[in-house]
Image (cartoon, rainbow, N blue to C red):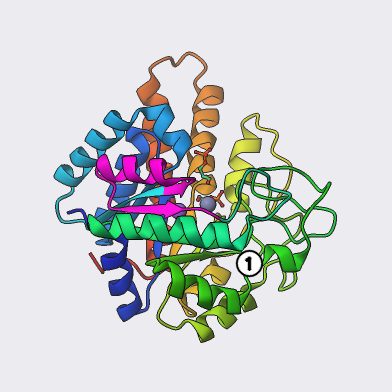
Amino acid sequence: ARITLRQLLDHAAERGYGVPAFNINNMEQGLAIMEAARACDAPVIIQASRGARSYANDIMLAKMIDALADIYPEIPVCMHQDHGNDEATCLTAIRHGFTSVMMDGSLEADARTPASYEYNVAITERVARMAHWVGASVEGELGVLGSLESGQGEAEDGHGAEGALSHDQLLTDPDQAVDFVARTRVDALAIACGTSHGAYKFTRKPDGEILAMRVIEEIHRKLPNTHLVMHGSSSVPQELQDVINKFGGEMPQTYGVPVEEIERGIRHGVRKVNIDTDCRMAMTGQFRRIAMESPREFDPRKFLKPAMDAMRDLCRDRLERFGAAGNA
Ligand code: G3H
Ligand code: 13P
Ligand code: NA
Ligand code: ZN
């Protein structure tokens, strides 16, 4: 059954668990997530980026969500717009059956210039008001996703160190978070704690300097009733890097967000945990393996089935470790 982000995260807060939000853009990813949720009796968040919507087509995605809800009627599922950039993106998502939207006002046109705080408040408040009229939930974002490693500064659009923002400009300011939540009335708040999107988050296993979990603890102390969201939360497991590289890939060594750090976040108010890269890597490792091990193979299902199974196992592991298992 479809539920809103607010309903799901209120339940998660009551019981002290976190919910992974997995990105999809195709049927196999949708099935992998729902199979994982069914296998461990967990609620789940499925999210689509703007890129996913244009890749799959809004009508295809909308009907796919209907189909998934019909095939897995016992699984509470929240369908969420990931990184909506304006009112139109958010409202058209809701019109296509999404029960929740992210209005990401944390960046304006240019990643080198943080969005003006007042712009972010105004557009997020507007989207929250409209979404709430029709029963959908809203996630806002304060702070800028990007690496805190020296010389590695990279803001959300992937631009490099040149003109990089300082630590203080990237990390969410706890006092500003209090004001933001009060003024926008968001249902969940995405914060910046040093993570970034994609596989190349850290060049070494992160410590407290480059992965600033203390920021989350401080925000949670000031906003104990606000559901917090961690973006860029793929763990980029060594095993997945190894599979890809064993079968012809050339991914340079990299480090993601350790699952223990996410578990620590969940003890301090993190309720939604965004994961895309790990799912992509799980699938791609299997594509590469089949391509190398069975060079005569040309049936796409022979590639997609193992890829789907690998993504299912990854999703199930996160549902279990975040405590969502058993809460459907
Ligand atoms: O926000 C980033 C998500 O991983 C979605 O990525 O824009 O390539 O679909 P995408
Ligand atoms: P990853 O790239 O770490 O999977 O993050 C995904 C994300 O934050 C989507 O919004
Ligand atoms: Na999101
Ligand atoms: Zn994100």
Q: Nearer the viewer, residue 312 or 97?
A: 97
Question: Residue at the location (28% across, 62% down)?
Answer: 42
User: What is the residue that sits farthest to the bottom in this orientation?
Assistant: 221
Q: Is residue 33 above or below residue 286?
A: below
Q: Position of residue 178 (x, y in %)?
A: 52, 78
Q: Position of residue 239 (x, y in %)?
A: 59, 49
**Boundaries of the magenta span:** 82-105
Q: Is residue 96 magenta?
A: yes
Quadrant of the rendering where the N terminus is positioned = bottom left
Residue located beneath label 1 in the image: 193
Dividing the picture into quarters, in which one does residue 39 lie? Answer: bottom left
Residue 232 drawn in magenta = no
Please tell me how many numbered marks the rendered image carries.
Answer: 1
Q: Residue at x 44, y 83 (%)?
A: 224
User: Compared to 55, does 3 lie above or below?
Assistant: below
> As displayed, is residue 122 above or below residue 310?
below
> Is residue 271 visible in the rendered structure shown here?
no
Circle 1 Cα neighbour tier, 10 Å, few/some/many (<14 / 14–19 / ≥20): many
For mark 1, give the secondary structure: loop
The answer to whether residue 32 is seen in the rendering is yes
Taking the image as shown, residue 160 lies to the left or right of residue 13, namely right
Q: Residue at x 19, y 46 (%)?
A: 69
x, y percent for residue 296: 48, 13
Q: Is residue 258 left or right of residue 322?
A: right
The C terminus - image quarter: bottom left
Residue 209: x percent and y percent?
A: 75, 71
Q: Is mark 1 within 8 Å of ligand 2?
A: no
Residues 139 and 147: in front is 139
Relative horizontal placement of residue 157, taking residue 313 as reference (left or right): right
Nearer to me, 75 or 54: 54
Identity of the amino acid at label 1?
Answer: Cys
